Image (cartoon, grey):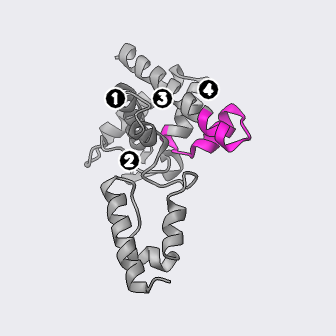
Amino acid sequence: MQTQAAEVDRLRRVTAERERTNQGTATVERIMRAGGAAAIEYAGRENVQRINAAPLDRLWKDGRISAREFDAGDWLRSLAYLAAIDPGTMAVNWDMAGGGGRSAKVPTMFSTQKIADARIEFRRIERTIRGVVMTTLRLGVIKEREMVEIGRAVFGHGNDRDARVAAAAGLQVALAALADWRETAG
């Protein structure tokens, strides 16, 4: 049986490696409070949704989408974030903004003109892109739901594995369609 000091040293090495590989992790102290090694093993399982593992980011990290498709998705994510800001208070309406946080492309200083432009552009997208493509984009890119949830809600798969596969494929197609629309719409 390992002593607590040996466990802490091992967890420091594991968390350093997870940070180096951009997997994200809690601090050693939080892991120890959550149950030590068992907590880090649980956090490594695929079915655990992490904030930094939004479906768009996950597809990009896995090399399943092109830079063009990632840029289109990140653009839509930032547009939705800006469109959800209440211009009177300059606060975000989190009911509309999705889950994982804003894109790096969102400006740090907001102006009512930027917010109004984002809302106009977002409405234009909603009028043009409809059906399964828009539903998939809304759940996967804007609301950043888990792949299993997308696969069940949009594609009707009950099996977790099939739902993940269908969601990933559907999101890839939806992002390609968004990128194509963005190029033609100018």
Which residue shows up at 43% across the image and 75% down it?
30
The reply to whether the C-beta atoms of the residues labelled 4 and 2 are less than 8 Å apart is no
| Label 2 environment density (alpha carbons within 10 Å; few <14, some 14–19, many ≥20) | some
State the separation of the CA atoms marked 4 and 2: 24 Å
Measured Cα–Cα span from mark 2 to mark 1: 18 Å
**Which residue lies under the disc numbered 2?**
102
State the extent of the magenta-drawn residues as a range: 141-165
Crowd rating for badge 4 (residues with CA inside 10 Å; few <14, some 14–19, many 20+): some
Q: Secondary structure at mark 1?
A: helix
Sequence order check, earlier mark of 3 and 1? 1
**Which tag, 4 or 2, sits closer to the chain's start?**
2
Q: Give the residue pinned by disc 3.
A: 123
SS class, disc 3: helix
Q: Nearer the viewer, residue 145 or 182?
A: 145
Give SS at disc 2: loop
Q: Nearer the viewer, mark 2 or mark 3?
A: 2
Q: Amino acid at mark 2?
A: Arg
Q: Is residue 19 magenta?
A: no
Kindly report which numbered mark, 2 or 1, lies closer to the viewer in this rendering: 1
Name the residue at 48% across, 80% down.
33
In the image, which disc is placed on residue 132?
Answer: 4
Q: Residue at x 50, y 83 (%)?
A: 1
Mark found first going from the N terminus, 2 or 1: 1
